């Protein structure tokens, strides 16, 4: 073996390592972007009408549907969400997220018992959204509410599952 072969071999080895490092750096750019993008992106929110004020009876809890804050053109049915609306008085409304705070399963309102029930893991919430039984540790998440031009509107945004 002569020194020319050794230096050629060394050159090719270093060239291979350089290409591998450059490829790894290029491949890591999307991963790093994916990890850090949420820190710089603002969460979408929008006010959505869920019905006329007079269509909600005082003391009743009903399910309403609305479009999410950031629907994509191809979202289809997944752009719809639901909530539970209770009219407490002439001017007061409470709107609960339909999602259980344990793992996000949809809760059902049982009018006879005046309880919200999560069928997946046995979570039970009182009519005020507080935890009555089961694994959830936090009450049901509430939406912000306003009345505008006779319509009940809720602020839609990504809600936490705590």
Image (tube, rainbow, N blue to C red):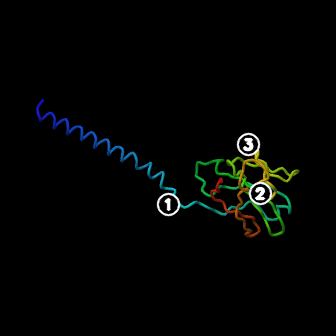
Per the image, the residue denoted by label 2 is 130
Helix, strand or loop at mark 3:
loop
Q: CA distance from mark 3 to mark 1?
A: 35 Å
How many numbered callouts?
3
156, 139: nearer the viewer: 139
- State the image coordinates of residue 134 (x, y, percent, origin top left): 76, 47
Dots 2, 3 in contact, CB < 8 A = no
Left/right placement of residue 136 relative to residue 55 reads: left
Q: Quadrant of residue 140?
A: bottom right
Q: Which mark is residue 40?
A: 1
Answer few, some or many: residues within 10 Å of disc 1's Cα (few below 14, many 20 plus, some between 14 and 19). Answer: few
- State the image coordinates of residue 106 (x, y, percent, origin top left): 72, 48
Q: CA distance from mark 2 to mark 1?
A: 33 Å
Helix, strand or loop at mark 2:
loop
Query: Residue at point 52% right, 59% down?
Result: 41
Answer few, some or many: residues within 10 Å of disc 2's Cα (few below 14, many 20 plus, some between 14 and 19). Answer: some
Q: Nearer the viewer, mark 2 or mark 1?
A: 2
Q: Quadrant of residue 67?
A: bottom right
Per the image, the residue denoted by label 3 is 120
- State the image coordinates of residue 75 (x, y, percent, origin top left): 61, 48
- State the image coordinates of residue 76 (x, y, percent, origin top left): 63, 47
Above or below 20: residue 44 = below
120, 149: nearer the viewer: 120
Q: CA distance from mark 2 to mark 3?
A: 18 Å
Helix, strand or loop at mark 1:
helix
């Amino acid at each position: 073996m002569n020194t020319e072969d050794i230096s050629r071999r060394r050159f090719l080895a270093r060239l291979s390592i350089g290409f591998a490092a450059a490829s790894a750096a290029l491949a890591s750019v999307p991963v790093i972007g994916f990890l850090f993008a949420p820190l710089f992106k603002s969460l979408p929110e929008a006010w959505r009408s869920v019905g006329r004020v007079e269509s909600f009876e005082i003391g009743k809890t009903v399910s309403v549907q609305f479009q999410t804050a950031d629907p994509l053109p191809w979202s289809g049915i997944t752009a719809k969400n639901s909530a539970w609306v209770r009219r407490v008085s002439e001017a007061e409304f409470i709107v609960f997220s339909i999602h259980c705070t344990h793992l996000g399963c949809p809760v059902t309102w049982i009018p006879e018992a005046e309880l919200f029930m999560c069928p997946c893991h046995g979570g039970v919430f009182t009519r005020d959204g507080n935890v009555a039984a089961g694994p959830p540790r936090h009450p049901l998440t509430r939406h912000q509410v306003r009345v505008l031009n006779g319509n009940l509107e809720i602020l839609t945004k990504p809600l936490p599952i705590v």
